[in-house]
Image: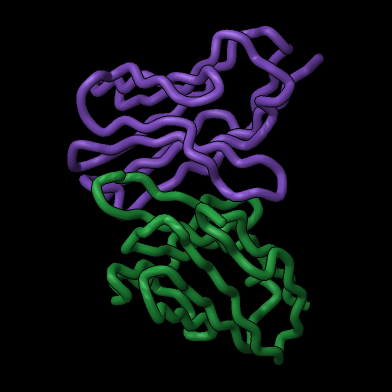
Chain colours: A green, B purple
Amino acid sequence: ETGVTQTPRHLVMGMTNKKSLKCEQHLGHNAMYWYKQSAKKPLELMFVYNFKEQTENNSVPSRFSPECPNSSHLFLHLHTLQPEDSALYLCASMGGYQETQYFGPGTRLLVL
Amino acid sequence: AQSVTQLGSHVSVSEGALVLLRCNYSSSVPPYLFWYVQYPNQGLQLLLKYTTGATLVKGINGFEAEFKKSETSFHLTKPSAHMSDAAEYFCAVSGLGAQKLVFGQGTRLTINP
């Protein structure tokens, strides 16, 4: 499988649940990103990882907890979310001299 | 600091007509500029990018964009629209290396038969 994959594609959760989003890239990249895409708002950068180290946290609430165990995998752990957290969560990766971020298909999250 | 303004949240053109999607940016450093397309229920796909060199950039699906420094613009064009071009289009700016993209709010393109 090539490119950037994300699972699950759709997720419905209650405010007291704990769930995780997974992103995997098969491009050999060393940087990975989480973005949030809400209706009527620009894409918001949430976290950046370079060589497994977090290099950016864009003032994201602590109910979102990222994890990057290696350069190919990125997780977003979710707990006690709010309805306003419902959105499309996109993962991206970038590497080498390509100077381009490649995006996965996203996880559509609904918090009830 | 960097920012992007996409003029027009919704653009509608007839099939076969010219497509013009406007993007203006602000950047304190020489910008890298990108156009991405998003089809329903999908992620973002790169259409084209400008980093350095030639200011007229050609991308996939017949799209092109021209970097105009004096106008701080990077408008996206396609000479003849096709029904399959219906999607949302995002302009983005970054500094050197594209590490941190700042996106515009997007323009939804509708193609009328």
Left/right placement of residue A17 relative to residue A38 reads: right
**Going 65% across and 84% down the picture, which residue do you hit?**
A19
Left/right placement of residue B95 relative to residue A78 reads: left
Pick the residue in front: B94 or B62.
Answer: B62
> Residue B81, relative to residue A84: is it above or below?
above
Left/right placement of residue A81 relative to residue A28 reads: right
**Going 61% across and 9% down the picture, which residue do you hit?**
B80
> Residue A53, relative to residue B84: is it above or below?
below
Q: Quadrant of residue A63?
A: bottom right
Q: Quadrant of residue B28?
A: top left
> Residue A99, relative to residue B33: is it above or below?
below
Work out which quarter of the rendered image holds the C terminus of chain B and state it. top right
**Going 70% across and 25% down the picture, which residue do you hit?**
B84
Percent position (x, y) of residue B57?
36, 21
Percent position (x, y) of residue B65?
41, 21
**Going 50% across and 38% down the picture, which residue do you hit?**
B36
Pick the residue in front: A21 or A59.
Answer: A21
